[in-house]
Image (cartoon, helix red, strand yellow):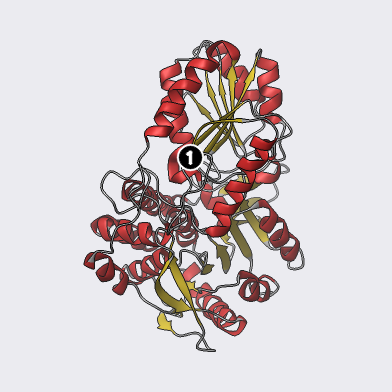
Amino acid sequence: MNTHDQPHHPRETTVLDAVPRGLLIDGTWQSAAAERTFDVEDPSTSTTLCAVPDATADDALRALDAADRAQSSWASYPPRHRGEILRRAFETITSRHEDLSLLMTLEMGKPLAESRAEVTYAAEFFRWFAEEAVRIDGDYAVSPNGSGRMLVTRQPVGPSLMVTPWNFPMAMGTRKIGPAVAAGCTMVIKPAHQTPLTMLALGEILTEAGLPHGVLNIITARHADEVMRPLITDPRARKLTFTGSTQVGRTLIEQSARQVLKTSMELGGNAPFLVFDDADVDAAVDGAMLAKMRNIGEACTAANRFYLHRDIAEEFTDKLTRRMRALRLGRGVGDNVEVGPLIDSAQRDKVTELVDDAVGQGARVLTGGKAETGTGYYYPPTVLTDVPPSARLTSEEVFGPVAPISTFTDEDEAVTAANNTEFGLVSYAYTRDMPRALRVSESLQTGMVGLNQGVVSNAAAPFGGVKQSGIGREGGKIGIDEYLETKYIAVGGL
């Protein structure tokens, strides 16, 4: 059911008006040097929400200037004090939960229920790393020959460049900012041009929490390369972290090679969802709805390829199709809306192209399959069956509400199909056979496995992939390692 033709509410204007409309550089909100701006669009109506500064390379370098100046004093800040800043920011996010959720829905499109869940998830990274700030440890040992001592300490990497995506505009920010603050790194962060407002609101919250000037600098820009390339090639930058497509990630890694920047990359995914013949089918369908439809399918962790054992394929497909067909499509602020618009026309066109390619090669549409007409960038929940291995959907990340289904006959066939991709972020598997669960989990070539559950994201767990899905891990107790260098001090004269 489509309910996206709804009027704007006065509260939406109030929430938008509360967001700073500037670049955050050295603790102050500023206009872009060239006085340029770009529009932020509401994907549910295709209308403009507001305009924000369109930074130039000079603006970006001013932000790096500020981060560089602040680095030494920030690195010496007491760890407890750094943690308390994060704790205060966590509490402020929690207190402004509803306004932040509405803001996110307006610029990104997801239903309010999902925005609320993201705000809660995003805040957890600040709470988690507030506690990790005081747990940065080192080592002390007698040298093997007894003539000296070996002292090992860990220090902040230094000024860190951050690029965040549009699909989780707050959580992808806090997942990077949290460990950087805890470790003692200064930052220049560029949010996606489609969703800059949530990051600007987050910058204001951190400023209120007492983050010193210059520690966090935010630049908004329509074209990322114009502002990021000068920063990546500047010797003052010591770290680059990016969440986004593998194609862009490869380019950034190449650019980073000149300065030998420490990099962490959370890139694309093409997650397989395996359901074995001994699985609890109802539980698997519940998990599939989460793994596929979280964030409208616009998630690197989204289940993109469904592989069903032939003995349960008909039952699973029928139940999944009925669930997908019943989802309520509409503007994210609407009552009971479960599926919002895609982020923009380009994304809707990509989903359309991939579905049409699969159908052209023999796939059958069980529900959905055609873009919505009218305002906004809507695409209905879609289930395809009989998807051939040659369909682009099997190798390309769809980033939309499309569930392509194929079948298998044995465990080896399923694992082989699941691993037949350049990506390796996350896999999902449903089985009640524990030996099989362990075998399959160990055989799947991904950095994460959802075993009998459809969501793997957790601030307390390491998030990241293998193969071309990325480098490094975010979150968990090892997430802070990406922002620390290890220094060995050889102590003699004893």
- Quadrant of res 488: bottom right
Identity of the residue drawn at 47% across and 70% down: 74
Q: Residue furthest front?
A: 373
Q: Nearer the viewer, residue 427 or 213?
A: 427
Count the labels in the image: 1
Badge 1 density bin: few <14, some 14–19, many ≥20, Cα 10 Å: some
Identity of the residue drawn at 48% across and 73% down: 217
Q: Residue 145 location, x and y as percent?
A: 73, 43
Q: Residue 44 location, x and y as percent?
A: 40, 58
Q: Nearer the viewer, residue 91 or 313?
A: 313
According to the image, label 1 marks what residue? 461
Q: Residue 427 location, x and y as percent?
A: 58, 31
- Quadrant of res 445: top right
Q: Is residue 328 left or right of residue 473?
A: left
Q: Is residue 51 above or below residue 113?
A: below
Q: Is residue 388 above or below residue 256?
A: above
Q: Residue furthest bottom?
A: 34
Q: Nearer the viewer, residue 170 or 283?
A: 283
Identity of the residue drawn at 59% across and 58% down: 242
